[in-house]
Each structure stands twice: as C-alpha cells, then as structure tokens.
Image (cartoon, grey):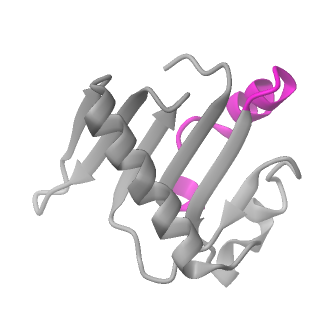
Amino acid sequence: MRCTKTIDIIAPSITDVAPSLSDLRSLIAKGVKVRLITQFEKEKLDEYSTLPDEIEAVAPATPIYLDLTISDSNEALLSVTYRSNQKHNVWSSIDTYTLTMLMCSRTTGTAANQSV
C-alpha cells in the first residue's frame, strides 16, 4: 500500500502492527496521518514507548481479532487468522468495501474513547 494522506491500522496487539515502526516513522516524516487502534498490554510497555508521538493511538473497548490496514481511505488490507492459525488476507480498492471498513475502524476506536 502506498500512503500519501492517512493510514488507519487495527491490530490485536502492538506486536501485530504492520507496517513496522520504522515504516510508520517514514510515513509520518512524509506528512501521512497515522491512526492506530490496538490493545495496550501492561507487559509490553517498552514497545509502546517507541511509538512516535504523532501517532493517534486508541485502545478499543473490546478485544480485536483481526488486522486491518486502510490506506488513504481507498485501499484496505484485511488479515484474519482462522482456527488453523493460518492468516488469510483480503485486499480491496472497491470504494464501498473500503469506506465500510474505515467506518468500522473509526467506530471501534471512538467506542473505547481511550487515548494512549
């Protein structure tokens, strides 16, 4: 995914976030707004301290079981782990699908109303 404006990321935990923190820093340096919704576990506080201040990070009210990355509100990559622990990826640039995923991601983040 190539981002020029925004990237919205939903992940079960900080260790599941893709792209890497160095990639996110590069995007921020280019002026891309980064939004992250993930669980913040106390035992991983060291990893949270490495998050750039420019990242808008939110903890959801309920656990997350998927990875979702939305680029510039027009591309979405959804990764779901099935019972066999295999990840299955779905990429889409279909406007309706991507906007639906974006609305879900924004709703998930605002439902918690907890900024980090």
Q: Which secondary structure type mostly characterizes the magenta part of the structure?
A: helix
Q: Residue at x 69, y 42 (%)?
A: 34
Q: Is residue 1 magenta?
A: no
**Residue nearest the observer in this picture, 93 or 37:** 93
Rendering coords of residue 115 (x, y %)? 74, 73
Q: Is residue 22 magenta?
A: yes
**Residue nearest the observer in this picture, 22 or 94:** 94
Q: Residue at x 74, y 32 (%)?
A: 22
Residue 26 falls left or right of residue 76: right
**Above or below for 30 versus 22:** above
**Residue nearest the observer in this picture, 54 or 85:** 54
Confirm whether residue 77 shows in the render: yes
Rendering coords of residue 10 (x, y %)? 49, 55
Number of marks present in the image shown: 0
Rendering coords of residue 103 (x, y %)? 43, 53
Q: Residue at x 38, y 33 (%)?
A: 76
The magenta segment is 13-32
In the picture as drawn, the residue positioned furthest to the left comes out as 84
Rendering coords of residue 72 (x, y %)? 55, 28
